Amino acid sequence: MNDIQTGELPATVPPIGGLSIAHLARLHGVSLRSVERALRILHRGVPELVALVEKGELKLSPAEFIAHLPLDRQREIVAQGAEACRQLAGAKRPRKQCPHCGGAL
C-alpha cells in the first residue's frame, strides 16, 4: 500500500514548486500542520472534497477526516454538502476532556 492509499505523507515530502512545506507555511502565515492537512486532502480527497475546501465551505480538519474514508464514501458524504461533512467529522472525533474534572475542553 502506498502513501496515497494510506493517506500518509511520505517521510520526506519533496519541495512544492521549489518551496519546502515549512517555507510554504511561513509564506502563507499558517501552521506546518495546516499545510500537511492540505496536502493530505489533495492527495487523498476526491475532487469534490477539495473543491469544498478551496471555496471555503469546509475547513481543513473535517476535510482531512473525510479524506481518510474510502473514495466512494467520500463522494457520498460530499454529495450531501459541507454541513454533512462537518457533522460526520465532529461526531467521529473524540471530545477532549479536562483530566482534572472531566469537563469538555
Image (cartoon, rainbow, N blue to C red):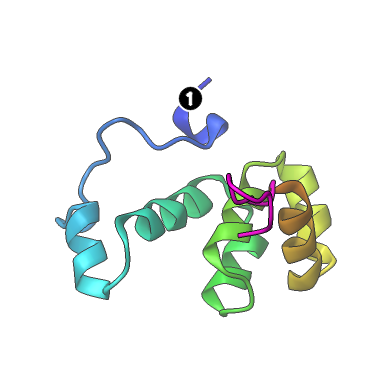
- Identity of the amino acid at label 1? Asn
Q: Position of residue 20 (x, y in %)?
A: 18, 52
Residue 22 pos. (x, y %): 20, 55
Quarter of the figure with residue 19: bottom left
Camera-side residue of 105 and 31? 105
Can you give x and y, in whole percent of width and height, for residue 103 in the image? 69, 56
Q: Quadrant of residue 80?
A: bottom right
Total numbered labels placed on residues in the image: 1
Establish if 71 lies above or below 54: above
Most extreme residue toward the top is: 1
Mark 1 residue crowding within 10 angstroms, few (<14) / some (14–19) / many (20+): few
Quadrant of the frame with the C terminus? bottom right
Magenta range = 94-105
Left or right of 90, for residue 100: left
Magenta-span inclusion, residue 71: no
List x then y, in percent, for residue 1: 53, 20
Nearest the eye: 94 or 104: 104
Residue at the image position 52 percent from the left and 37 percent from the top: 7
